[in-house]
Image (cartoon, rainbow, N blue to C red):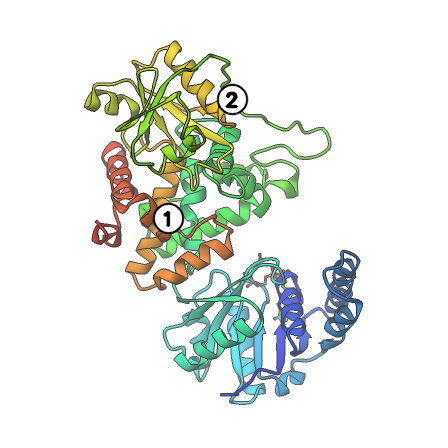
Amino acid sequence: MVDEIKIVGVVGAGTMGMGICEVAAANGCKVLVHDINETFAQQAHEAMAGRLKKRVIKGKITQDQADDITKAVKVVKSLDAFQVCDLVVEAVVENLDVKKQLFQQLEQLVSENALLATNTSSISVTAIAAALQSPSRLFGLHFFNPAPVMKLVEIIKGLKTEETHVQMAKRLCKQWKKIPVVAQSTPGFIVNRVARPYYGEALKLYQEQMASIIHLDTVLSKAAGFRMGPFALMDLIGIDVNFAVSQTVYREMYNDPRYKPSLIQGEMVHANQLGRKTDEGFYPYGETAKKAKPDYLHSDAQFDRFTVPDDMTFLSRMFSEFEYDQRQWQGDKIIISGCQLVMSNGMTAKQVEKKDGMPTCLVDLSFDYMKAECLSLAFSPKVDVFMKNRIVALINHIGKDVLECPDQPGMIANRTIAMLINEAADAVFNGVCSEDDVDLAMKYGVNYPKGLLAFAEEIGWQHVADTLEHLQHWFGDDRYRLSPYVRSQL
Ligand SMILES: NC(=O)c1ccc[n+]([C@@H]2O[C@H](COP(=O)([O-])OP(=O)(O)OC[C@H]3O[C@@H](n4cnc5c(N)ncnc54)[C@H](O)[C@@H]3O)[C@@H](O)[C@H]2O)c1
């Protein structure tokens, strides 16, 4: 194996290929790029120079840096030029046969010490490697789009991948200022597997008529703290692309109900309503499109004294600005005008009201209640208009919007986050990746505000387990079964 990667070959000059060229060139490597369509490769090289120019204008890089990167990347007509490469990264069309054929050709061409990597996002690295005489040479180097911007790279170990190659790939990613995580070759690797419930639960909630699309998106972004709501995100990714990944993961997981694709998504694809690229997805786009608005509750009602727990809790912290305020009493829970405010743990507000003998307002989960722009609430039957108005007024007073959702178990964000945590936990339980790597992957691959396992520690594993067990009981669906990893944390 080579000691240092100096010359990199990239096959495929599409979105990912050119992004990878730029990353390698910006970090001191010489890069050769080859595409089956040479004219396209030349145009892609010019387009890269154009993008770099824009970064110079924005003051992000200097003209010299842009020139150096552009000059370091050379388009080559034939794969024969790759003989000098220390590493070849494949970023051609997502097709197993094409990739196999290409690596068979590359294996004959490059030096026996050179490393071979695939940027596949969904094909088994083991299956691609099986075409090689030395399958131990191949590993996955899964960049995220846009490669020059996104920090995460998943290094994928096929069944026969040599460990020293994985270590070399890790060092290289760090040299390229990326954050590497290591995953076994399994469906969806880390990010595309663990993120499935973000779309899957949102689609299921919509199908169950829990709330409108804009309501669900607003709860998950402005209340929970995800950067983008799942429906807006699916419109951006392409509903067909997202549906294809969901179907692949479901099929390759042998129809595990956790990954079951949505009928709604299938219908959207049938209608060619694919998101931004067709000007219509879950939202309308185009010039005349109107922006949807959620139905916030507002109240100007006066509120007087309310009670908060003596010890600040994850939820009550958001009232900390009232800390020395005479309007606040100390007690053992948050009580506003005779109604208790509790975090949803998978029970309905009605069930909690019955258990505690008190009118109940459930608050949906947020990664950080202090930062949340909005709170999502569900009320039990005994919460009257007077109580409701005072609760809404108090929350409006601390600068947050309020959305009311129907009293269904787990609410919206709590149900989604519990499922995401369960998925992250299960990936670790099944040896896909380490605890540290699953948290890094979701933070840097899809910009989650916190690592999922770290967040479970913060809110308590019991909360996650309770939520999932209530959901499993309510729906009678194995989809919500607890990962043994979650159970082991209790
Ligand atoms: N687009 C993404 O968001 C993304 C993210 C991560 C990984 N990936 C993976 O990266 C790979 C490339 O994706 P992309 O989005 O850049 O695709 P793309 O369609 O933009 O580019 C693919 C390029 O490969 C070329 N090509 C096809 N067959 C070839 C061959 N035999 N030899 C040489 N060139 C060939 C095509 O001409 C095309 O220019 C796929 O495996 C994909 O799954 C994509």
Q: Residues within 10 Å of mark 1 (few under 14, many from 20)?
A: some
Q: Find disc 1 in the rendering and name its residue.
A: 455
Q: Give the percent coordinates (x, y) of residue 393.
A: 46, 18
In depth, the one of 377 and 161 nearer the eye is 377
Q: Amino acid at mark 2?
A: Tyr
Identify the element where label 2 is drawn. Answer: loop
Ligand 1 shows up in which quadrant of the image?
bottom right
Q: Is residue 186 above or below residue 313?
A: below
Question: Earlier along the polypeptide chain: callout 2 or callout 1?
Answer: 2
Q: Can residue 162 be seen?
A: no
Q: Give the percent coordinates (x, y) of residue 223.
A: 47, 34
Q: Give the percent coordinates (x, y) of residue 237.
A: 57, 47
Residue 284's label in the rendered image is none
Q: Is residue 478 left or right of residue 37?
A: left
Q: Is residue 272 above or below residue 430?
A: above
Q: Is residue 144 left or right of residue 74?
A: left
Q: Find disc 2 in the rendering and name its residue.
A: 296
Identify the element where label 1 is drawn. Answer: helix
Q: Amino acid at mark 1?
A: Phe
Circles 2 and 1 in contact, beta carbons < 8 Å: no
